[in-house]
Image: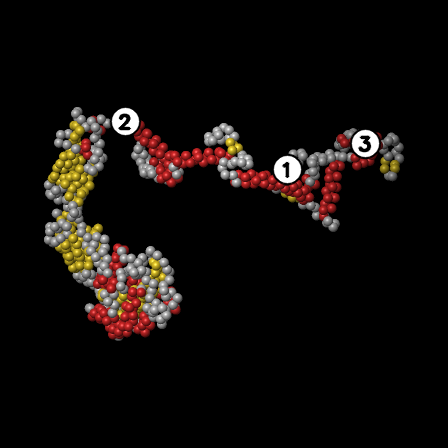
Amino acid sequence: MISTSSSATTNGCDNISSNCVIWQGPDIACIDLCNGDTISEVTKKIGDKVCQIITDGVSANPNLTGLDLSCLNIQGTTPTTLVPVLQAMVNQICLNASSSGSGGTTPLPMMVLPACLRYNDASGNPVTELRLDAFATLIANQVCTNLASINTINTTLTSFNTRIDVLEACVLPCSGGVVEAQIIPTCVSNVGNLTNVSVVVLALETAFCSLQTAVGLPSAINLAINQSVITGTSNSLTDSSVSYGSISGWNNSPSTLAQSVQNAWVVIDDIYSAVAAIQTNCCPGGCDAIVYNYTTSNSFASNGLINGVLFNFIGSSIPSTFTDASGYTLLTLTDVTGTSLSTTVSVTSLQNDAAGYFFSTGALNTAQDLSVTVNYSFVNGTDTCANNQSSVITGLVPCSTPVTSAITETDVTVTFSNLLGTTAIYTIDIIDGANVVVATEQVTNPTASVSRTLTGLTPGTAYTVRLTVQFNGATQVCNSTQQTFTTESAAASCSDGMDVAFIMDYTGSMATSIATLQSGFASLISTISTSSGANNYRLSIVTADEAINSTTPNYASCTEYTSLPAAQRLNYPGNSNHQLFITAWEMFQDNNATTATTALNQLGQPAGGATCVQMGNGGATGPECTDQAINRVLNNSFTNAWRSNVAKYIIVGTDVLPGGDDGSFDANDWTFIQTLATQALTQGVQIFILGPGVDVTYTPPGQSAVFPWRYLATQTGGAFNNTFDTAVINSQITAACLTP
């Protein structure tokens, strides 16, 4: 700059030298500009810097550290200077342009890598996502790697299969061309040396069998596990307030040998501690070492009275240094009258005698309580040891069991055995459901067998018979032997209407009887209709049949049978391969003479007859299931429910005993017959049994022979006859209708 002092002006401005103008701004380090430089110096420094930039051109490369370039997905080290950064940007723009297609602008998406494919780049930075093309490349490479691994595995498996085939074909020990794997056994066979596997396996089997023989089979081991009578509730010997179940290590329900052995060790440890305590603290000396203890049990005479007392001294413990004192231990029994019996025994001998000592009560009154005293006495040469103990034996008056019979609407006969002689006094009470005594009788000076009839009872009512015994000043109410019964329901008059059920044993031997019933059925209906007076009668017809090893009756395909409702065709299995067929051919209906006659006449037809309802299979030559049919009709409304306030009859035709569900008559069937009798009485149903079956007997265990069918008839107010004739049935119905 040229300095000037001219006062001239240029373009309206005062002229002044650039050397005279001072830069008063801040220092600018990049161009070496400082506060206080002249404008001439400032201009030159700026000019120099512009020339340098023009000269250098694109070679200028400023430091770009800190710039976020993650979206460019640059592989390797992230650049920090301008040129590499610009190049990466250009590359990304070109890539996006090529991938968008047809002029599109959508870039390739970034794909998140699954955990198994994530890796670190060359700089150690974790790579968790890649652009789609890089992601696809990575997946392709991994697939190739996996395929190579699969090929290797398949080759190995082929080799294994070949070797396994060889081993499976080998019968131990392998020989010949089979090359076995070898192992070094440590406790069997060729110990410590390489040995074929087959040889080792055989040696293991031999060792296992020997061990099994010594230890036992699993069943024997399980038996041993369950042998112990000690349970988790058993008290410890060391501390009686502690049960084994609360001790650590105890298994309440051992199921393995190890658990059982563990329990055994718990008990052994407890026993050890208890024995150690005994050794430490044992033993009391002198009289303190004696344990006094006895128990009593009663002996009974044939009449049920106490006739002796059995003393047992097993609970006593008398040291061997002691003997019985002179006169021994004194036993005394005293009754309520003050009468006493005494005897002496050697407790030192009896303490090891489980049989004990029998002390006869003689003439003592055992109906009331007996007092017992035991006066012990022992000596050891120095000490004399005595102890007195006492107890009470409860007096006992035996009770007889009453038996009821001849039960009517208002009466019952009670029978029982008297085993106490003529001095006993019995009271018979009849008690109703409200526990009220409705009838009573006292029996004095009784004979060996007592029988009394009590009256004034209500028809169709359940009662209890109870005996009370007075003997030798004691009174015993016999609740344990009381019996129940039900009075017969008040029989309605036939003129009030009649329900009559015919139940037939439908087996081959009964064909003639059924034909007889068919021929005389009109006469029976006339009798029933006349007896019913102006009221309705109802009839039903039921057959009972059975088969062995068959589930269908002979008439299973007959239209007359198949057309019946399923509820009228009972077909169910019994016992002993018996199948029971109970069929209701006619149901109770008002004045149903016509339909009942039709139903009856279709029965018992021979093969090729008017109908196909031929006689049934028959279970065998023995009993048939007629009692099951009676039960269905009586209790299960099998032919419709019985009416109230009408005369109710069941007429049974059979030539054998009832067979229940198994074709045989036994004690269970006898009990069932008695039950049916009671149920019929309660319902006011009279049962008539006709045919040879009434003459067949049964002998209950320990009893005399009985006639089951006769019992059922007489107990229900019905009748029986060994012939099956309509004239007999007519007469029995007529007689029943005339009975008040």
Q: Is residue 288 visible in this depiction of the protein?
A: no
Q: What is the secondary structure assignment of the residue under circle 1?
A: strand
Q: What is the secondary structure assignment of the residue under circle 3?
A: helix
Measure how far apart labels 3 and 1 are at the Cα level: 52 Å
In the drawing, what numbered circle is on residue 45?
3
Q: Cβ–Cβ below 8 Å for labels 3 and 2?
A: no
Q: Which residue is mark 1?
A: 119
Front in this rendered view, residue 711 or 705: 705
Which quadrant would residue 458 be assigned to in this image? bottom left
Give the class, few, some or many, for how many residues have Cα within 10 Å of label 3's Cα (few <14, many ≥20): some
Give the class, few, some or many, for how many residues have Cα within 10 Å of label 1's Cα (few <14, many ≥20): some
Give the residue type that dot 1 points to: Tyr
Give the residue type that dot 3 points to: Lys
- First in sequence, mark 1 or 2: give its number: 1
Residue 694 % position (x, y): 23, 63
Measure how far apart labels 3 and 2 are at the Cα level: 118 Å
59 left or right, relative to 620: right
Front in this rendered view, residue 590 or 105: 590
395 left or right, relative to 177: left
Residue 661 % position (x, y): 31, 58
Between circles 3 and 1, the one closer to the viewer is 1
Give the class, few, some or many, for how many residues have Cα within 10 Å of label 2's Cα (few <14, many ≥20): few
Which quadrant would residue 373 be assigned to in this image? top left
Q: Which residue is mark 2?
A: 281
Residue 139 % position (x, y): 65, 42
- First in sequence, mark 3 or 1: give its number: 3
Residue 310 % position (x, y): 18, 40
51 left or right, relative to 91: right
Front in this rendered view, residue 696 or 270: 696
| Residue at x 37%, y 36% (from the top left corner) | 260
Give the residue type that dot 2 points to: Asn
Please, which colouring scheme is shown? Answer: secondary structure
